Amino acid sequence: MATNNVAMELKSEGNQLYQQGRFEDAVNKYNQALDAGALRGRGGREEASIHANLSLTHLKMGMATLAVKDAQAAQRADPKWSRGYTREGDAWTAVGRQADATRAYQNALSLDPQDQGARRAMAVQTAPTQQGMPQHPRGPSQPGQPGVTPGYAAPGPQPGMDRKEAAQARDSYRNNWQTDLLRAPCNDCKFCCFSVFCSPCASFILRKRALYGDMERYTCCAGYMPCSGKCGESSCPSCCLCLETWCCFANSVASTRFLLQDELHVMNTK
């Protein structure tokens, strides 16, 4: 019993480190909790909850493969706990494998129909995409050239509008930005990106998760801490710090909204 208490204390410390954004330290603390309590392979909710936390933390670090493995370890530890399947779905979503994500979320809901994480995720997956979105595929973005779907125009005022039209577009955007954020830059991540986890899709996934309350509120740098665009990776620390990948470039939904509101440091809220 004392050993389990130590494990739970270490888990609690890991949770605090996670909240502080110290993800590597949190991972170490969670692993210490598993070892201190001799929980690995024992099974049960305590082991499952730590693996679920590891999955979420690894996903935050951009390590989706590890996040999937952690989630599956949580499932093995407690097959009747829905959270392990929800975490797996989140990890598959992050890499654009929607079929696998849907399967995992459905498994979670079969165990617990009230699992809010799985319910929100399924609602997001069925959210309508932008009307008039280009239907032709595009390739992955190249280093130095952040991917933007050809013909995809940022919402809000557009070149060629007169003053009245621009004012109407601006007001509509301000009133409906939550809907706009749920519109994917790609018609289908799996095909339009050729299965590459491109920057617009990464950004879209993060925006969806934040709007549905499954992630902390986050701050967009609005160009103050831009990525050089040369990394070509969605896991670039500068990009992830912003959480609106390459937000300082054209056609970014978030940066356009901030410019329309004449704000540079804005906390996204519901």
Image (cartoon, grey):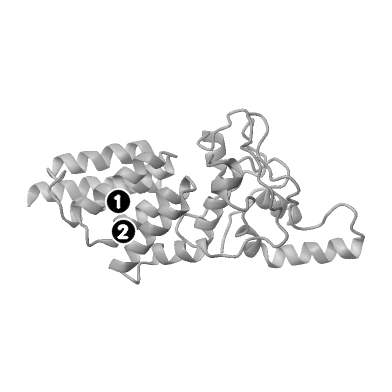
User: Closer to the camera, 8 or 128?
Assistant: 128
- Vertical relation: 164 (above or below) 104: below
Q: Is residue 72 left or right of residue 94?
A: left
User: Closer to the camera, 201 or 23?
Assistant: 201
**Residue 83: mark in rendering:** 2
- Vertical relation: 248 (above or below) 117: above
Q: Is residue 150 left or right of residue 80?
A: right
**What residue does disc 1 label?**
52
Q: Hey, which quadrant is residue 60 in on the image?
A: top left
Q: Hey, which quadrant is residue 25 in on the image?
A: top left
User: Closer to the camera, 66 or 171?
Assistant: 66
Q: Position of residue 16 (x, y in %)?
A: 33, 48
Q: Is residue 251 left or right of residue 195?
A: right
User: Do callouts 2 and 1 mark residues in contact (Cβ within 8 Å)?
Assistant: yes
Q: Position of residue 28 (x, y in %)?
A: 28, 37
Q: Residue, x 38% and y 60% (percent of image)?
A: 105
The reply to whether residue 17 is visible in this rendering is: no
Q: Residue, x 17% and y 46% (percent of image)?
A: 7
The residue carrying pointer 1 sits among few (fewer than 14), some (14 to 19) or many (20 or more) residues within 10 Å by Cα, namely many
Q: Position of residue 169 (x, y in %)?
A: 80, 63
**Residue 70: mark in rendering:** none
Q: Quadrant of the C terminus?
A: bottom right
